[in-house]
Image (cartoon, helix red, strand yellow):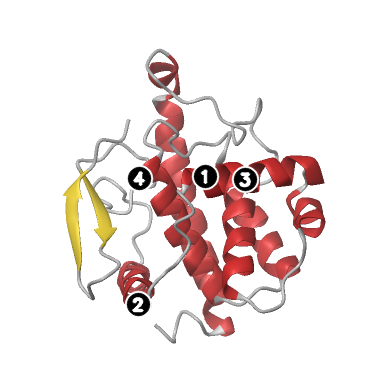
């Protein structure tokens, strides 16, 4: 757990998370047309076009300018996982992943850090307006059901899982990746907030 919170490990963590999100987004992009014909949710996170900046460059920009603690990025990842579990008809794709990232990191920083920047600053970092940032935050909080608390056991479980995947250095193969973030897989890795262990359960993601 402490290893991922080391600032020197952040470039590796950001690269891995970026690779994960890129592949999940591209996979869901492939199913975009099918989703449009089904019950895909209209959301403030969904952009009309794909941002020109890559996911990794965007996440690196957030890391550079947000000045939040390293643990915020792990908590943001927990939030994204929770969000996609609670919002199965809003899969992560290339049209919403950037907005989801800036919002999840901002919410994590507000919850985790004693000192953090305001919404206007995060909006500037994310390349959006303050009004849009405010709407994104509100929608994200309601999407999470205001479930922001991350227990030490849950935090450690996510850290252990991320560390094991990073050690394998095979982030590009997501056929059986458990933390699906909305990707249509057979299983989804969920963590019980009151238990130190984690368990798999059936996922009904689109």
- Where residue 164 sits, quadrant-wise, is bottom left
Q: Residues within 10 Å of mark 1 (few under 14, many from 20)?
A: few
Do labels 1 and 4 touch, CB within 8 Å? no
- Residue carrying label 4: 85
Residue closer to the observer: 12 or 202? 202
Whole-number angstrom distance, CA of label 4 to CA of label 3: 18 Å
Q: Is residue 114 left or right of residue 32?
A: right
- Residue carrying label 1: 142
- Residue carrying label 2: 156
Whole-number angstrom distance, CA of label 1 to CA of label 4: 13 Å
Task: Classify mark 1: helix, strand or loop.
Answer: helix
- Residue carrying label 3: 138
Residue at image point 26% right, 71% down: 194
Whole-number angstrom distance, CA of label 3 to CA of label 2: 27 Å
Depth check, mark 4 against mark 3: the one in front is: 3
Residue closer to the observer: 180 or 190? 190
Task: Classify mark 2: helix, strand or loop.
Answer: helix
């Amino acid at each position: 757990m402490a290893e991922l919170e080391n600032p020197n490990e952040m470039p590796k963590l950001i690269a891995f998370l970026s690779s994960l999100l890129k592949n999940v987004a591209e996979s869901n992009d492939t199913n975009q047309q099918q989703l449009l014909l089904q019950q895909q949710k209209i959301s403030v996170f969904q952009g009309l076009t794909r941002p020109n900046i890559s996911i990794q460059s965007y996440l690196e920009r957030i890391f550079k300018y947000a000045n939040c603690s390293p643990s915020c990025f792990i908590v943001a990842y927990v939030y994204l996982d929770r969000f996609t579990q609670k919002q199965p008809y809003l899969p992560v794709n290339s049209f919403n992943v950037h907005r989801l990232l800036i919002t999840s990191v901002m919410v994590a920083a507000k919850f985790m850090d004693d000192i953090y920047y305001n919404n206007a600053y995060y909006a500037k970092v994310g390349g959006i307006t303050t009004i849009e940032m405010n709407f994104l935050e509100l929608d994200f909080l309601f999407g999470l059901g205001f479930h922001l608390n991350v227990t030490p056991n849950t935090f450690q479980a996510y850290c252990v899982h991320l560390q094991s995947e990073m050690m394998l250095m095979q982030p590009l193969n997501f056929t059986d990746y458990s933390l699906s973030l909305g990707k249509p897989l057979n299983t989804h890795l969920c963590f019980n907030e009151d238990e130190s262990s984690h368990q798999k359960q059936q996922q009904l993601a689109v």
